[in-house]
Image (tube, coloured by chain):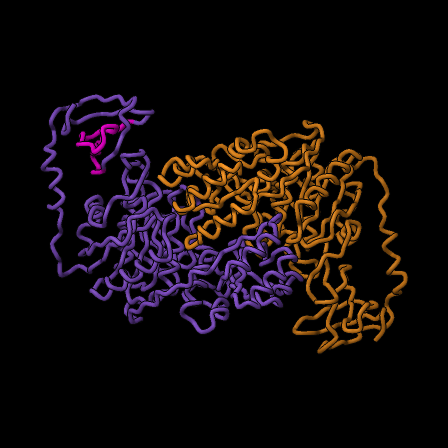
Chain colours: A orange, B purple
Amino acid sequence: MNAGDRVRVERAGVTNEGVLMPSSTPDHLVVKLDGGYNVGIDRDDADVEILETDVYDIEDAQTDSSSSEIEFDDDLPTVSLISTGGTIASTVDYRTGAVTAQFDAEDVLRAVPDLAGRANYRGRVVANILSENATPEVWRDLAEAVKEEIDAGADGVVVMHGTDTMQFSASALSFMLDTPVPVVFTGSQRSADRPSSDNVMNAVCAVEAAKSDCAEVLVCMHATESDDVCALHRGTRVRKNHTSRRDAFETVGAEPLGEVDYESEEVTFRREHAERDEADPSLSPELDGDVDLLKFTPGMDVGRYGEFLKESDLDGLVIEGTGLGHVHTDFVPVIEDLVDDGVVVAMTSQCLWGRVCDRVYDTGRDLLDAGVVEAGDTLPGTAKVKLMWALSNLDDPAEAMTRSVAGELQQRSVPWE
Amino acid sequence: MNAGDRVRVERAGVTNEGVLMPSSTPDHLVVKLDGGYNVGIDRDDADVEILETDVYDIEDAQTDSSSSEIEFDDDLPTVSLISTGGTIASTVDYRTGAVTAQFDAEDVLRAVPDLAGRANYRGRVVANILSENATPEVWRDLAEAVKEEIDAGADGVVVMHGTDTMQFSASALSFMLDTPVPVVFTGSQRSADRPSSDNVMNAVCAVEAAKSDCAEVLVCMHATESDDVCALHRGTRVRKNHTSRRDAFETVGAEPLGEVDYESEEVTFRREHAERDEADPSLSPELDGDVDLLKFTPGMDVGRYGEFLKESDLDGLVIEGTGLGHVHTDFVPVIEDLVDDGVVVAMTSQCLWGRVCDRVYDTGRDLLDAGVVEAGDTLPGTAKVKLMWALSNLDDPAEAMTRSVAGELQQRSVPWE
């Protein structure tokens, strides 16, 4: 058994077939699957069958990537692919057998040949992280990179991003950027080495959306469990509503802005949106880091949390309240003190759907008297990002929380409300 | 204009017609609507038209309630109505014009004449609070009251409860109680003085469900925006997913257990459930109050929260992580320290739908190594209540978080996962 042999490897009930590659660790076999991805397999208990020896010139294969450089086509728009890591840019980690981020944008282009011929591509890597490790600094770096790509002539930008916190990054860019071109986040719920992977279709649809006339920050992910349509969600209204399904992302409280039909490649918008070239590109990337999101639940120790919040020297606090936007009555004086200390306190609802309204019940009226501002139907996570941005960029951040800045707050969520 | 006159009052664009009642404050008019409810209206800027004088003998009306006492019917089951407050048991607050809780169970029975003839009723008041003020003490009082009602011969129990935290109370009773009869929570998203109120239909359907053979803790609320069907949700799987819609409550990750057709009064169950009289009634009401629910979001100050959690002397911590159950990598050592200090740390997902799985990505594997237990598809709020209960009642609460105790953790959420 040597590198270059075609092998079938069975381990723990999983069979992989492909070409054996040189491995960087003695504990793992590395098999290049026919789709182009490498899989790392623990040698222990692996059952290897050699199908054909020496089918592949390893040196050729390892330098082969340079041959995939694509020539510039004047007739095609230019799309910038920005990689931040995540499942769509990942393969199997040889060390642990789990998935880690280790591809850059050009690797993705090589791994998704279907992207070829759709655009001229620019590629850059802003980060190489699983998205639970995203921070406000990553958001800022990403926004700056997008702005630079737009300034360099990109007709659209695709951001490849882990799905865990994609909605937060998309929200951040929605507030930070005025964009004359589409900025389309996409990712993958199933890694490329799984037969059900959504990475190719999501990437293809995102590129098609990046060529469209919708100059907004969008999230492009499977609209259904089938490989038929990707939904285009407004970055500030989207939420990951399932841990594992490919159609995990949903626009909350409205229909998605539009969709991309995978087969026909047609991009359709059903709702009003900003048009290409309407806005001059500009960037306001500053964020205030002293903002907390606090989810209120019954049994919460108001005294302990009250002390903590007072000592935290916050500039902003987003509360994820119950129902129309409530907390235990004992919490009201805590909030009043925070507001008196200059903290902007904004109310959202853990119901997620529907808007807060603190004028109906006593608790809500007491909260309004305490100085809480109502964030309408802004999603709690989006409200946190917005408040971080508003505190650094707007004269009256409290007032801004009650109106739409980037489509995050809808006047009426649904017609029947 | 005197008490007893029939009047039409217009104020701020709202018109109410009914009989003028004596008011407890000089600032408000109180009008008894034809449906039986009293509305308080601010006198300022109120435009009053007298339609007919002296139509109503106030003294008669005020003692009239005693005539609604219902005689015991041997052929009917006995249903206990327990009131805890909330919109279903509320009318308009004369002081503020907003809705506050001020009805007891018998008032509800008088206000919902449709309940008559369906059962013999027992009524008691356990609390008179808006449900954002519910605490573990209220859950315990409620569980004890339900147990007493069962012991006293109730064939079913209806708990009228505010909708804000109904899912938490229903979860608490699900863990605390073994019940041989249905225990049905119901409430109202729109107060009785609004034409779109859901209080009558929800109460009627809850009583019908309480007469059924499903001996579980259920939540009975509108299944659609129409007045046609109420859904019956398992208490540990239900979530309020809209701030204001009448069909705000949903079973997450499964179909509801069953439904009540309002017109035909038929109660149908579509899923397996505990049957009447299978269980001996028993109560384990102890809860550990030192449990926090922490929602992780990007930008969270790990250092500050880490200190806070360590100083909080917790027994349990439920994390609402991202995606499959992740937090920023910097959080992992904090969690490891907590586990080393004996804190049970359970992972759930803020996605809400789907189950956590920390074996796929590096962060998750690091969390498992740190000693985090996976709560499957248990909803974060339910997981908090469960951990409070498990820490006080089970030998191995950490292990219990990984399996179903009261239907809160499903083996597979949906067939296609």
Image vertical order of residue B86 relative to residue B9, above or below: below
Q: Nearer the viewer, residue A395 or A386?
A: A395
Extent of the magenta region: B15-37
Residue B259 image offset from top left, x and y in percent: 34, 54
Residue A76, quarter of the rendered image: top right
Question: Left or right: B135 with respect to B32?
Answer: right
Image vertical order of residue A283 relative to residue B404, above or below: above
Residue B20 magenta-drawn?
yes
Where the N terminus of chain A falls, by quadrant? bottom right
Image vertical order of residue B408 relative to residue A43, above or below: above
Residue at position x 67%, y 32% in the image: A178
Where the C terminus of chain A falls, by quadrant? top left
Residue at position x 22%, y 58% in the image: B79
Residue B341 magenta-drawn?
no
Residue A384 image offset from top left, x and y in percent: 57, 42
Q: Nearer the viewer, residue A75 or B191?
A: B191
Question: Left or right: A25 with respect to B4?
Answer: right
Residue B12 image offset from top left, x and y in percent: 33, 25
Q: Nearer the viewer, residue A306 or A270?
A: A306
Question: Left or right: A58 with respect to B208?
Answer: right
- For the image, the number of numbered tags is 0
Residue B275 appears in the picture as rendered: yes
Residue at position x 38%, y 65% in the image: B272
Residue B194 image offset from top left, x and y in percent: 30, 36
Residue A88 appears in the picture as rendered: no
Residue at position x 67%, y 71% in the image: A14
